[in-house]
Image (tube, helix red, strand yellow):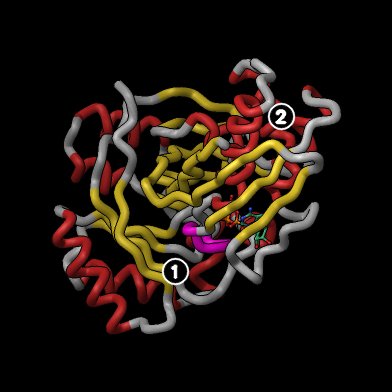
Amino acid sequence: MITKYAKAKVNLTLDILGKRDDGYHEVEMIMQSIDLADIVTLEDAEDIIVETDLAELADDRTNLAYRAAELLRDTYGKGRGAHIRIEKKIPLAAGLAGGSSDAAAVLLGLNELWGLGRSMDELTALGARLGSDVPFCMIGGTMLATGRGEVLTKVPPLGAYPLVLVKPPLGVSTAAAYGGYRADKVETHPTAKRMTDAIASKDITCVYEAMGNVLETVTIPLRPEIAEIKRALEEAGADKAMMSGSGPTVFAFVKTKEDARRIADKMRQKYSTYTICTTATCQGEE
Ligand code: ATP
């Protein structure tokens, strides 16, 4: 049996550069893995079976973990099967790449379990067919993602910083958020260059200043509570709060783990129906 921790991500920056002929948007993002992770266990079986601990998450072919297993089997592992159990910790449709991360864990885990010996390049190429965020979720750390998000370049690692996550009880469709994007509504675009310089300077306040997500201009007018959560987090003492991906999760940098716990408790009192947790950015390798 193999166990993988399928880590969530946040976007330190998210910019849209234009629309491509294939219908996707050209993006430039600095992606960051966080410690919040689903637990994915894999065991040999006759067929592909997916089991999750969340009733609202399908365990059939529509589950990205199932599709990852099927794609790997059909490409490199003819006749193999696996029993895949997913303990969901990452909220659904949250902007945290939960589904992509499960798919990434399945590709990496089944490559080991089935003894396929495929390279990371081969596996990330399969991952990109399942979703733009899957290759990043396979590699993790701090990365520049371009193209439709699947072209990855290593950048200096941010390091471990405590975070608070707040997700209001609504899901945001990634496709709808990108579909609603209007360049003329954006006043300032974040740049990956400014963010990587900020990370390299090791001055976290420069990182806060370089943060930006152009999809806030789409999601916040539809869901004003996101702006309200950002304000509430910063009023409670967080240093910088921003929406991740297409939302609706807001993540906030705080100074210490104790601050994270205190601020999360405050948020729980204020927003009793929201999903709130403390976590941290992943250390990453130099
Ligand atoms: P991204 O940030 O990559 O757009 P997200 O965090 O916004 O992703 P996900 O949690 O990955 O969104 O899920 C979006 C939808 O994908 C869910 O509503 C669900 O129906 C579907 N889905 C399929 N497989 C999974 C899975 N293993 N985990 C979560 N969602 C899944």
Disc 2 crowd, CA 10 A, few/some/many (<14, 14-19, 20+): some
Could you tell me which residue is drawn at 51 percent across and 76 percent down? 169
Front residue of this view, candidates 45 and 268: 45
| Residue placed under numbered mark 1 in the picture | 167
Which mark, by number, is residue 126? 2
Is residue 106 toward the left or the right of residue 160 in the image?
A: right
Decide: is 84 above or below 95.
Answer: above
The residues colored magenta run 89-94
- Looking at the rendering, in which quadrant would you find the C terminus? top left
Decide: is 17 above or below 276.
Answer: above
Residue 22 shown in magenta: no
Q: CA distance from mark 1 to mark 2?
A: 30 Å
Kind of residue at disc 2 = Leu
Could you tell me which residue is drawn at 45 percent across and 55 percent down? 244
Decide: is 178 above or below 249.
Answer: above
Q: Position of residue 17 (x, y in %)?
A: 58, 40
